Amino acid sequence: MNEKTTIATKELLYKIADDLLIIGHRNSEWTGLGPILEEDISFSSMAQDKIGQSMSVFQILQQLGEGEPDTVAFNRASENFYNSQFVELPNGEYDFSLMRHFLYDHADQLRFEMLAKSSFDPIAKLAQKIKGELKYHVYHANIWVTKLGNANEESHSRMQTALNECWNFALGMFEESEFENTLINEKIFAGENELKKKWLENISLILEKASLKIPEEKNWKPFFGGRKHIHTEYLKPLVDEMGEVFSIDPGVEW
Amino acid sequence: MAITESEIWQALEVVKDPEIPTISMTDMGIITKVEVRGESSVYVEMTPTFVGCPAIKMMEQLVHDRLIEVGIKEVIVKTTLDKPWDSNKISERGLLCLKKHGLAPPPKHQGEITDELLENITCPFCESKNVEMKSPFGPTLCRSLHYCNNCLQAFEQFKPIV
């Protein structure tokens, strides 16, 4: 791999790993607080999956010369994170968390399906495995979004409001990299635009079943910036909290 | 006389899955390679059921300790995704062991997890098909929650995974 391709690949992997780590942490904040026991378990299980998956991506980054996974995850300043702003937003109420989970996981599953065909073998192998696990995340999201979209007036209107609030942040997930063409030409990743196209197709099918409406296209104003280290005020407190124990004694043997 | 690969596989049959102690790691299909390297040195490859499986380090240790116990001097255990795990890799005996533990075994998949596959579940207690999924997530990453409308019991399934 030449130098430019390596830089492009690293940036792609950081985006993916940071999204997983941060959404995983947000999911874990439902532990003990879920509206029903099954949902408490679901968000906690997804947190465990996502944080484990992020570690595997950080391990690939380590093979490419980056730092040791725990240090990179827990001892990095928040302004150096590559995650989209969407995943760092606070959980809000359950409707918002559920809608974000739906919009994020559809994108995540498609991203890993695309990466399973990557010319970069380590990520292709990992993606092959992860895409199977994500089936359950998407399945979970689809069931709840469809149920609550159709249940009663209150649940419907809350889910529609959540969709409207999430929308431009969700579009921000597909912020393009300056290395987009390198990734596409080297067949490492087919690109954010391709991903967004597939994502819109998949979520539209479910949202229709859920009687929910995607905001009108003229109002689409993606919140970009996360991939280039521009974050909301919510990321720093999250990163500080996540690294709190690690920072007490970074060199300690567990 | 040097130990053979089949003797190593046999020795590993007693190492149980820490989360489901009625099934061995070999029946689970998570040990993917055994290689005898010289007089008393063995290399073992494992693969996780889930990338985020918290038991993987413990399982590496269990495999290591078991082979030391049977007299191997040097044991190297490596976890890789070279041959990724899927639920079709559980042996016939393994599927029976899961059932004995009260878990509905995963149905065989054709390379894809479809909604039909997720809904085609048999109650491990009464064999009824009149069951419903309560949640795709259970007490461990590899299990889901169900309810049997026939024998009125809650049960868990070991999830099909591709």
Image (cartoon, coloured by chain):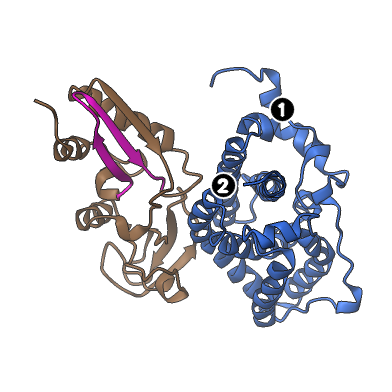
Return the x and y of residue A251 as percentages of the image width and height. Answer: 63, 17
Chain letter, blue: A
Q: Is residue A151 visible?
A: no
Return the x and y of residue B126 as percentages of the image width and height. Answer: 26, 67
Which residue type does callout 2 highlight?
Gln
Residue positioned 24% across, 20% down in the render: B73
Q: Which residue is mark 1?
A: A244
Write the start and end of the magenta stretch as one range.
B29-48
The crowd level at tag 2 (other Cα within 10 Å; few <14, some 14-19, many 20+) is many
Return the x and y of residue B137 as percentages of the image width and height. Answer: 50, 56
Asked where in the image residue A52 lies, by quadrant, the reply is top right
Q: Nearer the viewer, residue A123 or A182?
A: A182
Q: Which residue is mark 2?
A: A53
Q: Is residue A169 visible?
A: yes
Name the tint of chain B in the rendering: brown
Please report whichever mark, 1 or 2, sits nearer to the chain's N-terminal start: 2
Q: Chain of mark 1?
A: A
Residue positioned 57% across, 59% down in the render: A118
Q: Is disc 1 in the same subunit as disc 2? A: yes
